[in-house]
Amino acid sequence: MSDIVWLDGQFLPRQDARISVDDRGFIFGDGIYEVTRCVDGRLFEGPRHLVRMRAGLAGLRIDQASLPDDAALLALHHELLARNDLTSGQATVYLQITRGSAPRAHQFPAASVPPTLYLSASRITPADALRTTGARAILLPDLRWARCDLKTVNLLGAVMAKQRAVESGAQEAVLHRDGVVTEGSITNVFGVLDGVVRTHPVGTRILRGVTRDVTLELLHAMGQPVEERALLLEELPQLSELFYTSTTQDAMPIVRLDDRTIGDGTPGPVARRLGEAFARALHDAKRLR
Amino acid sequence: MSDIVWLDGQFLPRQDARISVDDRGFIFGDGIYEVTRCVDGRLFEGPRHLVRMRAGLAGLRIDQASLPDDAALLALHHELLARNDLTSGQATVYLQITRGSAPRAHQFPAASVPPTLYLSASRITPADALRTTGARAILLPDLRWARCDLKTVNLLGAVMAKQRAVESGAQEAVLHRDGVVTEGSITNVFGVLDGVVRTHPVGTRILRGVTRDVTLELLHAMGQPVEERALLLEELPQLSELFYTSTTQDAMPIVRLDDRTIGDGTPGPVARRLGEAFARALHDAKRLR
């Protein structure tokens, strides 16, 4: 079955999906994206992704008038999954919206230029094997800009950090700025210190992950003490657990950070319970659309 | 005459120049660019742009093996100008190189994936009229990442700042970080204080503009005292002149910054002499290729 994507109003084979060299996504990275987890053709926390998508468009002041409404966007996701034979098993839908195509000038183009809307879908293999052993991470300075709360495609900071991680034999880079852990290159980061789960508060320094929010809900439901307060670099040696969260990997324990073993070097109790809670949440009808 | 561009090994009409939705320029802003000023079909400081281009590729670790060598790239620029009937008068050539097209993953794709090479050319009208009256600018916080020395297409910081400037009736935004002026949204910034021209030193906080370097050379040739030392925000009220430099606008006096008049509100003597020096330099055979 061929790989079908949605671009500018139509479904078409991926190899035929091509954008103008004048697209502001290509020229300026001027756009936002979302990646939504899909289980048996349904969207995990789909509406939350759309809320964040619209917040990102508003943050970049990309006009939404010509874009489909939420119901139509959800229907597009579903149709795309169906056309790619992804209505059973696990998948992701990738959505990207750019400020459209216009002659190159940094300032916004005329209001008549419509945004570019692109969606694609891919099968994924859940990261259960890695979750059993735990992941490795490296610690890197956070070089990104001052609006990390916007999920934009200006992703070079993430690209370079993730590449460094992979070359180090790690799965993720944990970033720090001004003495505190912000987040991962493409994930949110949580640590357990003295029995309390800590993570960076929302604000301009991190992306508010949908999986981050679900993680907080699941932790609360477990009765686990949680504090949205950034981990200090000097607290890292005292952590009993460290884990990251992402749309595709749920909660992933980190058992080694650079040359430091976290806890006893195996996934800790909080991450293990979270993993079980995510396995249930992914099939919770209230979270699926 | 149709607008002809170069994309992935061939000349073709702009409307036929389309890139894959998997291009890492579109998905991650994972690439660099250059804009070179052209006079009567020749490239102003062309080799310097290629030096910076290669430094940017090295900075992002984009493999250069499959790219044309400098001589071939210069020839491509010339051929593109000829095919667009831009061998007389002023123009720019835009060049962009991305890390190529591959299934989406933040880390680098396989070494076998070739970079995408795109060039286009446009006629420009020199900004002489604005230079006579002087430009307006606004002061904004510099929100960009920590590697402003790389001329990447992660340009949202510049896009949002330039848009703010345009909406304020200004031509440029002057950016500040940690109490000092860094550069403009798409230009370098210079000020004159107590008879000395000051500009931010090279480093990771600014892009080392080719026009910035030419400006320094022209100032030295004039015997003008120059110091590569950042202007402090609190020094701005004492400036006798303020100007920005860019490939398309040479040296452009700023006569108003927010609500503050610079000097007497007209282009000052340093900027005027620089304007005359640029007019000569643009036709200096030693600078043209």
Image: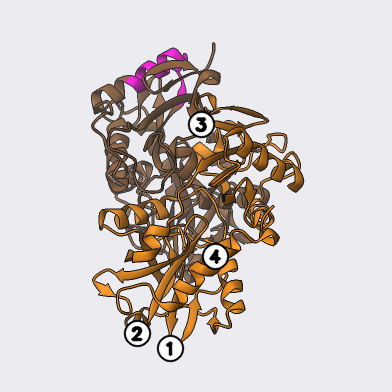
Chain colours: A brown, B orange
Q: Quadrant of the N terminus of chain A?
A: top right
Please tell me whether mark 3 sits on a helix, a strand or a loop: loop
Counting residues from the start of the chain, the first of labels 4 and 1 encountered is: 1
Q: Amino acid at mark 2?
A: Gln
Q: Which mark is residue B278?
A: 4
A89 and B191: which is toward the camera: B191
| Image coords of residue A221 (percent x, y) | 28, 44
A210 and B264: which is toward the camera: B264
Do marks 2 and 3 share a subunit?
Answer: no
Q: Which mark is residue B238?
A: 2
**Residue lying at 39% horizontally and 70% vertically, measured from the top left:** B176
Q: Amino acid at mark 1?
A: Asp
A264 and B218: which is toward the camera: B218
**Magenta stretch bounds:** A76-91
User: From mark 2 to mark 3, how far is it between C-alphas?
Assistant: 61 Å
Residue A138 occupies which quadrant of the picture?
A: bottom right
Q: Is residue B258 visible?
A: yes
- Residue reaching furthest bottom? B194
- Kindly indicate whether the residue at mark 2 contacts the one at mark 1 (C-beta within 8 angstroms): yes
Query: Callout 4: residue from which chain?
Result: B
- Kindly indicate whether the residue at mark 1 contacts the one at mark 4 (C-beta within 8 angstroms): no
Q: Amino acid at mark 4?
A: Phe
Q: In the displayed structure, does residue B85 sit left or right of residue B69?
A: left
Q: Which mark is residue A126?
A: 3
Do marks 4 and 1 share a subunit?
Answer: yes
Residue B238 occupies which quadrant of the picture?
A: bottom left
Q: Which mark is residue B194?
A: 1
Query: Callout 2: residue from which chain?
Result: B
Q: Amino acid at mark 3?
A: Pro
